[in-house]
Image (cartoon, helix red, strand yellow):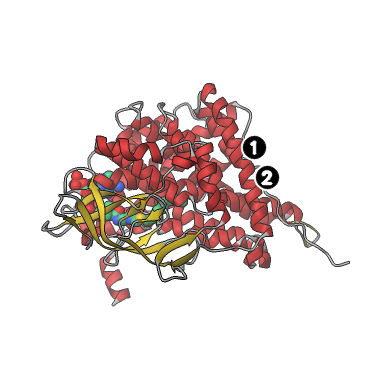
Amino acid sequence: MYFLQDPPHLSHPYRGDRLLLALLERALPAVCRAALDDDLDALGDYAQMAWRRTCTTTRRKPVLTQWDAWGQRVDRIELTTAWQEGAQLTTQHAVLAAGHGKNEHARLEEFARVYLYHVASEFYTCPLAMTDGAATAIRASGNRELIERALPHFLSRDASTFWLSGQWMTENTGGSDVGNTETIARQDADGRWRLYGRKWFSSAVVGEAALALARPEGAGTGTAALALFYVETMDSQRRKPELVIDRLKDKLGTHELPTAEIHLEGLPAWPLGELAHGVRQVAPMLNVTRTWNAICAIASMARAISLACDYATRRQAFGRPLIEQPLHAQTLADMQAEFEGAFALAFEVAHLLGRVEHGAAAPHEAALLRLLTPLAKLWTGKLAVKLCSEALECFGGAGYIEDTGLPQLLRDAQVYAIWEGTTNVLSLDSLRALAGDTFAALRTAVHDWSASADDASAIGTIVATLDAAAAHLDAHGSNRDSLEAGARGLALTLARCASAALLVRQATWSSRHGDSRPAAALQRFVSHGLNRLIAPDANNTALLLG
Ligand code: MFK
Protein backbone atom coordinates (compact mmCIF):
# COMPACT_ATOMS: atom_id res chain seq x y z
CA MET A 1 0.00 0.00 0.00
CA TYR A 2 1.32 3.42 -0.93
CA PHE A 3 1.58 6.19 1.62
CA LEU A 4 -1.51 8.41 1.65
CA GLN A 5 -1.29 11.90 3.07
CA ASP A 6 -4.07 13.03 5.39
CA PRO A 7 -5.48 16.29 3.93
CA PRO A 8 -5.87 19.43 6.09
CA HIS A 9 -9.04 19.57 8.18
CA LEU A 10 -10.92 22.80 8.65
CA SER A 11 -11.77 23.37 12.30
CA HIS A 12 -15.07 25.10 13.04
CA PRO A 13 -14.51 28.66 11.78
CA TYR A 14 -16.45 30.15 14.70
CA ARG A 15 -15.98 27.77 17.64
CA GLY A 16 -12.34 27.25 16.70
CA ASP A 17 -11.44 30.93 16.21
CA ARG A 18 -9.95 32.15 19.49
CA LEU A 19 -9.45 35.69 18.14
CA LEU A 20 -13.08 36.18 17.20
CA LEU A 21 -14.32 34.60 20.42
CA ALA A 22 -12.05 36.85 22.52
CA LEU A 23 -13.02 39.97 20.57
CA LEU A 24 -16.74 39.33 21.03
CA GLU A 25 -16.23 38.50 24.70
CA ARG A 26 -14.32 41.75 25.27
CA ALA A 27 -16.34 44.13 23.10
CA LEU A 28 -19.96 42.98 23.21
CA PRO A 29 -22.46 43.15 26.08
CA ALA A 30 -23.66 39.67 27.06
CA VAL A 31 -27.19 40.34 25.83
CA CYS A 32 -25.96 41.03 22.24
CA ARG A 33 -23.73 38.00 22.37
CA ALA A 34 -26.49 35.53 23.17
CA ALA A 35 -28.56 36.61 20.16
CA LEU A 36 -25.56 36.56 17.85
CA ASP A 37 -24.22 33.13 18.77
CA ASP A 38 -26.81 31.08 16.85
CA ASP A 39 -26.16 32.94 13.61
CA LEU A 40 -22.39 32.65 13.98
CA ASP A 41 -22.64 28.95 14.75
CA ALA A 42 -24.81 28.39 11.68
CA LEU A 43 -22.48 30.39 9.42
CA GLY A 44 -19.52 28.42 10.77
CA ASP A 45 -21.37 25.17 9.98
CA TYR A 46 -22.06 26.43 6.46
CA ALA A 47 -18.38 27.31 6.00
CA GLN A 48 -17.32 23.78 6.98
CA MET A 49 -19.87 22.26 4.62
CA ALA A 50 -18.75 24.57 1.79
CA TRP A 51 -15.08 23.62 2.31
CA ARG A 52 -15.97 19.93 2.05
CA ARG A 53 -17.93 20.72 -1.10
CA THR A 54 -15.01 22.66 -2.59
CA CYS A 55 -12.76 19.66 -2.05
CA THR A 56 -15.16 17.14 -3.57
CA THR A 57 -16.80 18.88 -6.53
CA THR A 58 -15.60 20.35 -9.79
CA ARG A 59 -15.45 24.11 -9.69
CA ARG A 60 -17.72 25.99 -12.04
CA LYS A 61 -17.98 29.50 -13.36
CA PRO A 62 -21.13 31.50 -14.07
CA VAL A 63 -22.37 31.24 -17.63
CA LEU A 64 -23.82 34.12 -19.66
CA THR A 65 -26.34 33.28 -22.39
CA GLN A 66 -27.02 36.38 -24.46
CA TRP A 67 -29.53 35.03 -27.00
CA ASP A 68 -32.17 32.32 -26.70
CA ALA A 69 -32.77 29.68 -29.36
CA TRP A 70 -35.31 31.91 -31.14
CA GLY A 71 -33.10 34.94 -31.44
CA GLN A 72 -34.39 36.91 -28.47
CA ARG A 73 -31.84 38.84 -26.41
CA VAL A 74 -32.01 37.35 -22.90
CA ASP A 75 -28.66 38.09 -21.14
CA ARG A 76 -29.31 35.22 -18.70
CA ILE A 77 -26.60 34.36 -16.15
CA GLU A 78 -26.49 30.92 -14.55
CA LEU A 79 -24.90 31.12 -11.12
CA THR A 80 -22.87 28.62 -9.12
CA THR A 81 -24.38 26.75 -6.17
CA ALA A 82 -23.01 29.00 -3.42
CA TRP A 83 -24.41 32.02 -5.25
CA GLN A 84 -27.81 30.37 -5.56
CA GLU A 85 -27.77 29.79 -1.79
CA GLY A 86 -26.62 33.33 -0.98
CA ALA A 87 -29.90 35.24 -0.64
CA GLN A 88 -31.60 32.57 1.48
CA LEU A 89 -28.64 32.09 3.79
CA THR A 90 -27.77 35.74 4.31
CA THR A 91 -31.32 36.97 4.87
CA GLN A 92 -31.99 34.10 7.28
CA HIS A 93 -28.93 35.08 9.31
CA ALA A 94 -29.52 38.81 8.89
CA VAL A 95 -26.04 39.48 7.57
CA LEU A 96 -26.90 42.92 6.17
CA ALA A 97 -29.88 43.68 8.38
CA ALA A 98 -27.71 43.22 11.48
CA GLY A 99 -25.41 46.05 10.40
CA HIS A 100 -28.31 48.47 10.23
CA GLY A 101 -29.70 47.55 13.64
CA LYS A 102 -30.35 50.15 16.25
CA ASN A 103 -27.34 49.82 18.52
CA GLU A 104 -23.71 50.90 18.45
CA HIS A 105 -22.49 47.29 18.14
CA ALA A 106 -24.55 46.63 15.01
CA ARG A 107 -21.60 46.83 12.62
CA LEU A 108 -19.45 44.57 14.77
CA GLU A 109 -22.27 42.01 14.80
CA GLU A 110 -22.61 42.33 11.02
CA PHE A 111 -18.91 41.98 10.28
CA ALA A 112 -18.51 38.97 12.58
CA ARG A 113 -21.06 37.28 10.31
CA VAL A 114 -19.28 38.52 7.15
CA TYR A 115 -15.93 37.22 8.42
CA LEU A 116 -17.36 33.73 8.94
CA TYR A 117 -19.35 33.62 5.71
CA HIS A 118 -16.97 35.22 3.24
CA VAL A 119 -14.75 32.37 1.98
CA ALA A 120 -17.68 29.97 1.77
CA SER A 121 -19.72 32.56 -0.13
CA GLU A 122 -17.45 32.38 -3.18
CA PHE A 123 -17.51 36.20 -3.22
CA TYR A 124 -21.27 36.56 -3.03
CA THR A 125 -20.00 38.97 -0.35
CA CYS A 126 -18.96 41.34 -3.15
CA PRO A 127 -22.52 42.33 -4.15
CA LEU A 128 -23.54 42.10 -0.49
CA ALA A 129 -20.87 44.70 0.31
CA MET A 130 -22.15 46.98 -2.41
CA THR A 131 -25.74 46.51 -1.24
CA ASP A 132 -24.67 47.46 2.28
CA GLY A 133 -22.80 50.46 0.85
CA ALA A 134 -25.78 51.50 -1.25
CA ALA A 135 -28.11 51.30 1.78
CA THR A 136 -25.65 53.46 3.73
CA ALA A 137 -25.25 56.06 0.96
CA ILE A 138 -29.00 56.29 0.30
CA ARG A 139 -29.68 56.73 4.01
CA ALA A 140 -26.98 59.41 4.20
CA SER A 141 -28.54 61.24 1.23
CA GLY A 142 -31.77 61.74 3.21
CA ASN A 143 -33.77 61.04 0.01
CA ARG A 144 -37.06 59.80 1.56
CA GLU A 145 -38.45 58.38 -1.69
CA LEU A 146 -35.38 56.20 -2.27
CA ILE A 147 -35.02 55.25 1.39
CA GLU A 148 -38.59 53.92 1.36
CA ARG A 149 -38.23 52.35 -2.08
CA ALA A 150 -34.88 50.55 -1.75
CA LEU A 151 -33.92 49.98 1.88
CA PRO A 152 -36.72 47.54 2.76
CA HIS A 153 -35.35 45.32 -0.04
CA PHE A 154 -31.64 45.78 0.68
CA LEU A 155 -32.09 45.06 4.39
CA SER A 156 -34.79 42.41 4.04
CA ARG A 157 -34.72 39.30 6.23
CA ASP A 158 -36.76 37.44 3.62
CA ALA A 159 -35.07 36.09 0.49
CA SER A 160 -38.22 36.58 -1.60
CA THR A 161 -38.08 40.37 -1.18
CA PHE A 162 -34.30 40.78 -0.98
CA TRP A 163 -32.50 42.89 -3.61
CA LEU A 164 -28.80 43.15 -4.38
CA SER A 165 -27.30 46.45 -5.45
CA GLY A 166 -24.31 47.14 -7.66
CA GLN A 167 -21.88 50.06 -7.60
CA TRP A 168 -21.30 51.25 -11.16
CA MET A 169 -18.34 53.57 -11.18
CA THR A 170 -15.50 52.10 -13.22
CA GLU A 171 -15.35 52.96 -16.93
CA ASN A 172 -12.74 52.39 -19.63
CA THR A 173 -11.42 55.89 -18.94
CA GLY A 174 -10.52 55.10 -15.37
CA GLY A 175 -11.03 52.88 -12.38
CA SER A 176 -9.18 55.19 -10.00
CA ASP A 177 -9.77 58.54 -11.69
CA VAL A 178 -13.57 58.42 -11.92
CA GLY A 179 -13.56 62.14 -12.77
CA ASN A 180 -13.21 60.97 -16.40
CA THR A 181 -16.62 59.26 -16.33
CA GLU A 182 -18.24 59.34 -19.79
CA THR A 183 -21.73 58.04 -18.91
CA ILE A 184 -24.30 60.76 -19.56
CA ALA A 185 -27.53 61.39 -17.66
CA ARG A 186 -30.22 62.94 -19.83
CA GLN A 187 -33.80 63.92 -19.00
CA ASP A 188 -36.49 62.59 -21.37
CA ALA A 189 -39.62 64.47 -22.45
CA ASP A 190 -41.39 63.35 -19.23
CA GLY A 191 -38.58 64.73 -17.07
CA ARG A 192 -37.29 61.25 -16.18
CA TRP A 193 -33.52 60.84 -15.94
CA ARG A 194 -32.00 58.18 -18.14
CA LEU A 195 -28.40 56.91 -18.26
CA TYR A 196 -26.41 56.33 -21.45
CA GLY A 197 -22.91 54.87 -21.40
CA ARG A 198 -20.66 51.90 -20.75
CA LYS A 199 -19.60 50.54 -17.36
CA TRP A 200 -16.49 48.42 -17.58
CA PHE A 201 -16.45 46.43 -14.30
CA SER A 202 -19.88 45.61 -12.96
CA SER A 203 -19.59 43.07 -10.17
CA ALA A 204 -23.27 42.78 -9.29
CA VAL A 205 -24.92 42.66 -12.65
CA VAL A 206 -27.27 40.00 -11.32
CA GLY A 207 -28.56 42.52 -8.77
CA GLU A 208 -31.87 44.30 -8.89
CA ALA A 209 -30.46 47.81 -8.36
CA ALA A 210 -27.27 49.87 -8.48
CA LEU A 211 -25.79 53.24 -7.67
CA ALA A 212 -24.14 54.76 -10.73
CA LEU A 213 -22.04 57.84 -11.38
CA ALA A 214 -22.97 59.83 -14.48
CA ARG A 215 -22.47 63.32 -15.88
CA PRO A 216 -25.71 65.26 -16.31
CA GLU A 217 -25.94 66.46 -19.89
CA GLY A 218 -24.39 69.88 -20.23
CA ALA A 219 -22.51 69.70 -16.92
CA GLY A 220 -18.79 70.51 -16.94
CA THR A 221 -15.81 68.17 -16.83
CA GLY A 222 -14.12 66.64 -13.77
CA THR A 223 -15.23 64.99 -10.56
CA ALA A 224 -17.34 67.76 -9.05
CA ALA A 225 -19.70 67.77 -12.05
CA LEU A 226 -20.63 64.10 -11.65
CA ALA A 227 -23.97 63.12 -10.10
CA LEU A 228 -24.97 59.95 -8.28
CA PHE A 229 -28.02 58.01 -9.48
CA TYR A 230 -30.03 55.05 -8.23
CA VAL A 231 -31.19 52.58 -10.89
CA GLU A 232 -33.30 49.43 -10.94
CA THR A 233 -32.42 46.68 -13.37
CA MET A 234 -35.48 44.45 -13.52
CA ASP A 235 -39.03 44.67 -14.87
CA SER A 236 -40.64 41.93 -12.81
CA GLN A 237 -38.69 38.77 -13.80
CA ARG A 238 -37.01 40.27 -16.90
CA ARG A 239 -33.91 42.43 -17.09
CA LYS A 240 -34.76 45.89 -18.43
CA PRO A 241 -33.94 46.20 -22.15
CA GLU A 242 -32.03 49.45 -21.50
CA LEU A 243 -29.39 47.38 -19.64
CA VAL A 244 -27.29 45.25 -21.98
CA ILE A 245 -24.69 42.75 -20.73
CA ASP A 246 -21.82 42.70 -23.22
CA ARG A 247 -19.75 39.91 -21.69
CA LEU A 248 -18.44 38.42 -18.45
CA LYS A 249 -14.82 39.15 -17.52
CA ASP A 250 -12.19 36.42 -17.61
CA LYS A 251 -10.34 37.10 -14.33
CA LEU A 252 -7.31 35.81 -12.43
CA GLY A 253 -9.52 34.85 -9.46
CA THR A 254 -13.01 35.35 -7.97
CA HIS A 255 -14.19 33.02 -10.74
CA GLU A 256 -17.64 32.44 -9.28
CA LEU A 257 -18.36 36.18 -9.27
CA PRO A 258 -20.02 37.21 -12.56
CA THR A 259 -18.19 40.47 -13.25
CA ALA A 260 -19.59 42.04 -16.40
CA GLU A 261 -19.12 44.74 -18.99
CA ILE A 262 -22.43 46.48 -19.58
CA HIS A 263 -24.08 49.15 -21.72
CA LEU A 264 -26.74 51.53 -20.45
CA GLU A 265 -29.07 52.58 -23.24
CA GLY A 266 -31.42 54.97 -21.50
CA LEU A 267 -31.81 53.10 -18.21
CA PRO A 268 -34.26 55.05 -15.96
CA ALA A 269 -32.51 56.61 -12.96
CA TRP A 270 -33.24 58.64 -9.82
CA PRO A 271 -30.73 61.25 -8.59
CA LEU A 272 -29.81 60.66 -4.94
CA GLY A 273 -29.41 64.34 -4.21
CA GLU A 274 -28.03 67.42 -5.95
CA LEU A 275 -26.97 66.91 -9.56
CA ALA A 276 -23.27 67.34 -8.77
CA HIS A 277 -20.69 66.16 -6.24
CA GLY A 278 -21.56 62.52 -6.91
CA VAL A 279 -18.24 61.26 -5.52
CA ARG A 280 -18.89 63.06 -2.25
CA GLN A 281 -22.33 61.38 -2.17
CA VAL A 282 -20.95 57.93 -2.94
CA ALA A 283 -18.18 58.23 -0.31
CA PRO A 284 -20.27 56.58 2.48
CA MET A 285 -20.64 53.59 0.16
CA LEU A 286 -16.91 53.49 -0.58
CA ASN A 287 -16.02 53.55 3.08
CA VAL A 288 -18.42 50.69 3.84
CA THR A 289 -17.22 48.53 0.93
CA ARG A 290 -13.60 49.22 1.94
CA THR A 291 -14.44 47.90 5.39
CA TRP A 292 -15.91 44.77 3.79
CA ASN A 293 -12.73 44.45 1.74
CA ALA A 294 -10.61 44.51 4.92
CA ILE A 295 -12.79 42.00 6.79
CA CYS A 296 -12.89 39.66 3.79
CA ALA A 297 -9.11 39.93 3.42
CA ILE A 298 -8.59 38.82 7.01
CA ALA A 299 -11.14 36.02 6.47
CA SER A 300 -8.97 34.69 3.65
CA MET A 301 -5.86 34.96 5.85
CA ALA A 302 -7.65 33.12 8.67
CA ARG A 303 -8.61 30.29 6.33
CA ALA A 304 -5.10 29.98 4.85
CA ILE A 305 -3.41 29.96 8.27
CA SER A 306 -5.93 27.60 9.80
CA LEU A 307 -5.38 25.03 7.04
CA ALA A 308 -1.58 25.45 7.10
CA CYS A 309 -1.45 25.00 10.89
CA ASP A 310 -3.65 21.93 10.79
CA TYR A 311 -1.59 20.41 7.99
CA ALA A 312 1.60 21.02 9.94
CA THR A 313 0.32 18.56 12.56
CA ARG A 314 -0.47 15.88 9.93
CA ARG A 315 2.49 16.08 7.59
CA GLN A 316 5.76 14.39 8.54
CA ALA A 317 9.12 15.42 7.10
CA PHE A 318 12.59 14.39 8.17
CA GLY A 319 11.21 12.19 10.91
CA ARG A 320 8.78 14.51 12.69
CA PRO A 321 5.62 16.55 12.05
CA LEU A 322 6.17 19.89 10.34
CA ILE A 323 4.91 21.68 13.42
CA GLU A 324 7.95 20.34 15.32
CA GLN A 325 10.38 21.63 12.69
CA PRO A 326 11.79 24.86 14.18
CA LEU A 327 11.89 26.84 10.93
CA HIS A 328 8.41 25.77 9.86
CA ALA A 329 7.00 26.64 13.29
CA GLN A 330 8.80 30.01 13.14
CA THR A 331 7.23 30.72 9.74
CA LEU A 332 3.72 29.87 10.95
CA ALA A 333 4.12 31.97 14.10
CA ASP A 334 5.31 34.97 12.04
CA MET A 335 2.22 34.63 9.85
CA GLN A 336 -0.04 34.35 12.89
CA ALA A 337 1.39 37.51 14.50
CA GLU A 338 0.88 39.60 11.34
CA PHE A 339 -2.62 38.19 10.96
CA GLU A 340 -3.50 39.07 14.57
CA GLY A 341 -2.46 42.69 13.92
CA ALA A 342 -4.56 42.86 10.77
CA PHE A 343 -7.52 41.21 12.51
CA ALA A 344 -7.39 43.78 15.32
CA LEU A 345 -7.31 46.73 12.91
CA ALA A 346 -10.04 45.49 10.54
CA PHE A 347 -12.46 44.73 13.37
CA GLU A 348 -11.70 48.02 15.12
CA VAL A 349 -12.78 49.82 11.93
CA ALA A 350 -15.97 47.73 11.83
CA HIS A 351 -16.83 48.43 15.45
CA LEU A 352 -15.94 52.11 15.17
CA LEU A 353 -18.16 52.48 12.10
CA GLY A 354 -21.19 51.40 14.14
CA ARG A 355 -20.26 53.61 17.08
CA VAL A 356 -19.82 56.66 14.86
CA GLU A 357 -23.08 55.93 12.99
CA HIS A 358 -24.99 55.73 16.29
CA GLY A 359 -23.44 58.81 17.87
CA ALA A 360 -21.75 56.65 20.51
CA ALA A 361 -18.18 57.56 19.59
CA ALA A 362 -15.86 60.02 21.32
CA PRO A 363 -15.34 63.39 19.53
CA HIS A 364 -12.02 62.40 17.93
CA GLU A 365 -13.29 59.05 16.65
CA ALA A 366 -15.06 60.22 13.46
CA ALA A 367 -11.72 61.54 12.14
CA LEU A 368 -10.05 58.35 13.40
CA LEU A 369 -12.51 56.19 11.45
CA ARG A 370 -11.94 58.27 8.31
CA LEU A 371 -8.20 57.53 8.57
CA LEU A 372 -8.30 53.91 9.73
CA THR A 373 -10.69 52.83 6.94
CA PRO A 374 -8.22 53.33 4.04
CA LEU A 375 -5.32 52.15 6.23
CA ALA A 376 -7.09 48.89 7.10
CA LYS A 377 -8.15 48.33 3.50
CA LEU A 378 -4.74 48.89 1.96
CA TRP A 379 -2.69 46.99 4.51
CA THR A 380 -4.96 43.93 4.78
CA GLY A 381 -5.20 43.81 0.97
CA LYS A 382 -1.45 43.50 0.62
CA LEU A 383 -1.03 41.19 3.59
CA ALA A 384 -3.66 38.75 2.32
CA VAL A 385 -1.62 38.11 -0.84
CA LYS A 386 1.58 37.65 1.15
CA LEU A 387 0.08 35.32 3.76
CA CYS A 388 -1.94 33.25 1.30
CA SER A 389 1.19 32.80 -0.81
CA GLU A 390 3.19 31.77 2.27
CA ALA A 391 0.42 29.37 3.34
CA LEU A 392 0.45 27.63 -0.03
CA GLU A 393 4.21 27.17 0.33
CA CYS A 394 3.59 25.47 3.69
CA PHE A 395 1.95 22.65 1.70
CA GLY A 396 4.87 22.25 -0.71
CA GLY A 397 3.75 20.97 -4.12
CA ALA A 398 0.22 20.23 -2.85
CA GLY A 399 -0.32 23.95 -2.40
CA TYR A 400 0.12 24.35 -6.15
CA ILE A 401 -2.50 21.76 -7.09
CA GLU A 402 -5.98 23.01 -8.01
CA ASP A 403 -8.17 20.33 -6.48
CA THR A 404 -6.65 20.76 -3.01
CA GLY A 405 -8.73 23.98 -2.97
CA LEU A 406 -5.60 25.92 -1.98
CA PRO A 407 -4.53 27.85 -5.14
CA GLN A 408 -7.93 29.52 -5.20
CA LEU A 409 -7.09 31.24 -1.92
CA LEU A 410 -4.09 32.96 -3.48
CA ARG A 411 -5.76 33.86 -6.77
CA ASP A 412 -8.75 35.32 -4.94
CA ALA A 413 -6.57 37.24 -2.46
CA GLN A 414 -5.03 39.33 -5.25
CA VAL A 415 -8.32 41.13 -5.70
CA TYR A 416 -8.27 42.74 -2.24
CA ALA A 417 -5.41 45.02 -3.21
CA ILE A 418 -7.17 46.13 -6.40
CA TRP A 419 -10.87 46.39 -5.54
CA GLU A 420 -12.25 49.55 -4.06
CA GLY A 421 -9.07 51.50 -4.76
CA THR A 422 -5.54 50.15 -5.22
CA THR A 423 -2.89 50.36 -2.51
CA ASN A 424 -1.56 53.60 -3.96
CA VAL A 425 -5.00 55.20 -4.38
CA LEU A 426 -5.83 54.28 -0.78
CA SER A 427 -2.47 55.65 0.38
CA LEU A 428 -3.36 58.96 -1.27
CA ASP A 429 -6.81 58.78 0.33
CA SER A 430 -5.13 58.42 3.73
CA LEU A 431 -3.29 61.70 3.00
CA ARG A 432 -6.72 63.25 2.28
CA ALA A 433 -7.91 61.85 5.60
CA LEU A 434 -4.89 63.22 7.47
CA ALA A 435 -5.94 66.81 6.75
CA GLY A 436 -6.89 68.71 9.90
CA ASP A 437 -6.12 67.17 13.27
CA THR A 438 -6.56 63.51 12.35
CA PHE A 439 -3.00 62.67 13.37
CA ALA A 440 -3.83 63.95 16.86
CA ALA A 441 -6.94 61.72 16.82
CA LEU A 442 -4.71 58.71 16.12
CA ARG A 443 -2.38 59.64 18.96
CA THR A 444 -5.36 59.96 21.34
CA ALA A 445 -6.65 56.56 20.26
CA VAL A 446 -3.25 54.91 20.65
CA HIS A 447 -3.02 56.41 24.12
CA ASP A 448 -6.51 55.10 25.03
CA TRP A 449 -5.88 51.62 23.63
CA SER A 450 -2.65 51.21 25.56
CA ALA A 451 -3.87 52.67 28.85
CA SER A 452 -3.17 50.33 31.79
CA ALA A 453 -1.10 48.05 29.55
CA ASP A 454 1.52 45.60 30.77
CA ASP A 455 3.98 45.99 27.87
CA ALA A 456 5.84 49.32 28.28
CA SER A 457 8.43 48.40 25.68
CA ALA A 458 5.82 47.90 22.92
CA ILE A 459 4.18 51.21 23.80
CA GLY A 460 7.55 52.96 23.65
CA THR A 461 8.13 51.58 20.14
CA ILE A 462 4.67 52.66 18.96
CA VAL A 463 5.07 56.20 20.30
CA ALA A 464 8.59 56.55 18.84
CA THR A 465 7.31 55.36 15.43
CA LEU A 466 4.41 57.83 15.53
CA ASP A 467 6.94 60.59 16.32
CA ALA A 468 8.96 59.53 13.26
CA ALA A 469 5.78 59.61 11.12
CA ALA A 470 4.98 63.12 12.41
CA ALA A 471 8.52 64.25 11.58
CA HIS A 472 8.13 62.73 8.08
CA LEU A 473 4.91 64.73 7.57
CA ASP A 474 6.62 67.91 8.77
CA ALA A 475 9.58 67.32 6.46
CA HIS A 476 7.56 66.55 3.32
CA GLY A 477 4.21 68.26 3.96
CA SER A 478 5.02 71.36 1.94
CA ASN A 479 6.14 69.41 -1.15
CA ARG A 480 3.12 67.62 -2.64
CA ASP A 481 5.13 65.33 -4.95
CA SER A 482 7.40 64.29 -2.12
CA LEU A 483 4.42 63.72 0.19
CA GLU A 484 2.68 61.56 -2.41
CA ALA A 485 5.83 59.56 -3.21
CA GLY A 486 6.12 58.63 0.46
CA ALA A 487 2.39 58.05 1.03
CA ARG A 488 2.48 54.27 0.93
CA GLY A 489 5.31 54.04 3.46
CA LEU A 490 3.51 56.49 5.72
CA ALA A 491 0.20 54.62 5.43
CA LEU A 492 1.77 51.24 6.23
CA THR A 493 3.59 52.77 9.20
CA LEU A 494 0.40 54.27 10.63
CA ALA A 495 -1.50 51.03 10.00
CA ARG A 496 1.15 49.05 11.88
CA CYS A 497 1.22 51.54 14.77
CA ALA A 498 -2.56 51.41 15.12
CA SER A 499 -2.54 47.60 14.93
CA ALA A 500 0.21 47.31 17.51
CA ALA A 501 -1.69 49.55 19.92
CA LEU A 502 -4.85 47.48 19.38
CA LEU A 503 -2.81 44.34 20.08
CA VAL A 504 -1.63 45.98 23.32
CA ARG A 505 -5.27 46.44 24.34
CA GLN A 506 -6.19 42.85 23.45
CA ALA A 507 -3.06 41.42 25.12
CA THR A 508 -3.81 43.30 28.35
CA TRP A 509 -7.40 42.07 28.41
CA SER A 510 -6.47 38.49 27.50
CA SER A 511 -3.64 38.28 30.05
CA ARG A 512 -6.15 39.16 32.74
CA HIS A 513 -8.35 36.33 31.45
CA GLY A 514 -5.52 33.82 31.56
CA ASP A 515 -4.50 33.78 27.89
CA SER A 516 -0.95 34.90 27.13
CA ARG A 517 -1.09 34.19 23.37
CA PRO A 518 -2.15 37.76 22.35
CA ALA A 519 0.84 39.11 24.31
CA ALA A 520 3.07 36.75 22.33
CA ALA A 521 1.49 38.00 19.09
CA LEU A 522 2.11 41.61 20.17
CA GLN A 523 5.74 40.96 20.97
CA ARG A 524 6.35 39.23 17.63
CA PHE A 525 4.38 41.80 15.64
CA VAL A 526 6.42 44.67 17.10
CA SER A 527 9.63 42.71 16.52
CA HIS A 528 8.77 42.67 12.78
CA GLY A 529 9.09 46.47 12.93
CA LEU A 530 6.48 49.21 12.72
CA ASN A 531 8.36 51.80 10.72
CA ARG A 532 7.88 51.50 6.94
CA LEU A 533 8.65 55.17 6.17
CA ILE A 534 10.70 55.90 3.08
CA ALA A 535 12.51 59.11 2.28
CA PRO A 536 11.39 59.95 -1.26
CA ASP A 537 14.23 60.71 -3.68
CA ALA A 538 12.76 62.15 -6.88
CA ASN A 539 16.13 62.35 -8.67
CA ASN A 540 16.89 58.72 -7.99
CA THR A 541 13.38 57.72 -9.14
CA ALA A 542 13.75 59.72 -12.37
CA LEU A 543 17.19 58.20 -13.06
CA LEU A 544 15.96 54.65 -12.49
CA LEU A 545 12.94 55.06 -14.74
CA GLY A 546 14.65 57.20 -17.35
C1 MFK B 1 -15.51 40.85 -0.65
C2 MFK B 1 -15.16 42.27 -0.43
C3 MFK B 1 -16.11 43.16 -1.07
C4 MFK B 1 -15.60 44.51 -1.42
C5 MFK B 1 -16.47 45.20 -2.46
C6 MFK B 1 -16.07 44.84 -3.81
C7 MFK B 1 -16.57 45.77 -4.88
C8 MFK B 1 -15.60 45.83 -6.00
C9 MFK B 1 -16.01 46.70 -7.12
C10 MFK B 1 -15.11 47.90 -7.25
O1 MFK B 1 -13.92 47.86 -7.09
S1 MFK B 1 -15.94 49.31 -7.65
C11 MFK B 1 -14.69 50.48 -7.98
C12 MFK B 1 -14.19 51.13 -6.79
N1 MFK B 1 -13.56 52.33 -7.23
C13 MFK B 1 -12.92 53.10 -6.37
O2 MFK B 1 -12.81 52.78 -5.20
C14 MFK B 1 -12.38 54.41 -6.91
C15 MFK B 1 -10.94 54.64 -6.58
N2 MFK B 1 -10.68 56.06 -6.65
C16 MFK B 1 -10.74 56.86 -5.53
O3 MFK B 1 -10.96 56.37 -4.45
C17 MFK B 1 -10.53 58.33 -5.71
O4 MFK B 1 -9.81 58.79 -4.61
C18 MFK B 1 -11.89 59.06 -5.78
C19 MFK B 1 -12.59 58.69 -7.08
C20 MFK B 1 -12.80 58.71 -4.61
C21 MFK B 1 -11.71 60.58 -5.70
O5 MFK B 1 -10.91 61.09 -6.71
P1 MFK B 1 -10.93 62.65 -7.15
O6 MFK B 1 -11.58 62.73 -8.50
O7 MFK B 1 -9.55 63.20 -7.02
O8 MFK B 1 -11.94 63.35 -6.15
P2 MFK B 1 -11.75 64.42 -5.00
O9 MFK B 1 -12.05 65.76 -5.60
O10 MFK B 1 -10.48 64.29 -4.24
O11 MFK B 1 -12.95 64.01 -4.01
C22 MFK B 1 -14.28 64.35 -4.30
C23 MFK B 1 -14.96 64.49 -2.95
O12 MFK B 1 -15.12 63.18 -2.37
C24 MFK B 1 -14.17 65.31 -1.95
O13 MFK B 1 -15.12 65.96 -1.12
P3 MFK B 1 -15.58 67.47 -1.39
O14 MFK B 1 -16.39 67.43 -2.63
O15 MFK B 1 -16.39 67.81 -0.18
O16 MFK B 1 -14.32 68.28 -1.53
C25 MFK B 1 -13.44 64.26 -1.15
O17 MFK B 1 -13.08 64.70 0.12
C26 MFK B 1 -14.52 63.19 -1.06
N3 MFK B 1 -13.97 61.86 -0.82
C27 MFK B 1 -13.18 61.14 -1.64
N4 MFK B 1 -12.90 59.96 -1.07
C28 MFK B 1 -13.53 59.94 0.12
C29 MFK B 1 -14.22 61.15 0.29
N5 MFK B 1 -14.96 61.43 1.37
C30 MFK B 1 -15.00 60.51 2.34
N6 MFK B 1 -14.37 59.31 2.26
C31 MFK B 1 -13.62 59.00 1.17
N7 MFK B 1 -13.01 57.82 1.10
Cβ atoms at labels 2 and 1 below 8 Å apart: yes
**Residue 15 — which label?**
1
- Of residue 359 and residue 498, the one placed in the foreground of this image is 359
Q: Which residue is mark 2?
A: 11
The residue sitting at the right extreme is 1
Residue farthest to the bottom, as pictured: 546
Residue 161 can be seen in this image: yes
What residue is shown at x 36% (from left), y 38% (from top)?
A: 151
Q: Identify the disc placed on residue 221.
A: none
At 66% across and 48% down in the image, what residue appears? 49
Relative to 79, say whether 466 is above or below: above
Quadrant assignment for the C terminus: bottom left
Q: SS class of the residue under badge 2?
A: loop
Circle count: 2
Dot 1: what SS? Answer: loop
Q: Residue 458: where, in percent of width, then height?
A: 48, 39
Q: Residues within 10 Å of mark 2 (few under 14, many from 20)?
A: some
Q: Quadrant of the N terminus?
A: bottom right
Q: Residue at x 36, y 44 (%)?
A: 133
Q: Is residue 205 above or below residue 270?
A: below
Q: Measuring from the top left, give residue 123's x and y in whole percent.
A: 50, 53
Q: Is residue 410 left or right of residue 282?
A: right
Quadrant assignment, res 34: top right
**Circle 2: residue type:** Ser
Front residue of 143 and 17: 143
Amino acid type at circle 1 is Arg
| Observer-nearest of 60 and 534 | 60
For the residues marked 2 and 1, what is the alpha-carbon distance in whole angstroms? 8 Å
Residue 436 screen position, x and y as percent = 22, 40
Q: Is residue 398 left or right of residue 96?
A: right
**Residue 149 percent coordinates (x, y):** 32, 39
Answer left or right for 156 relative to 406. Answer: left
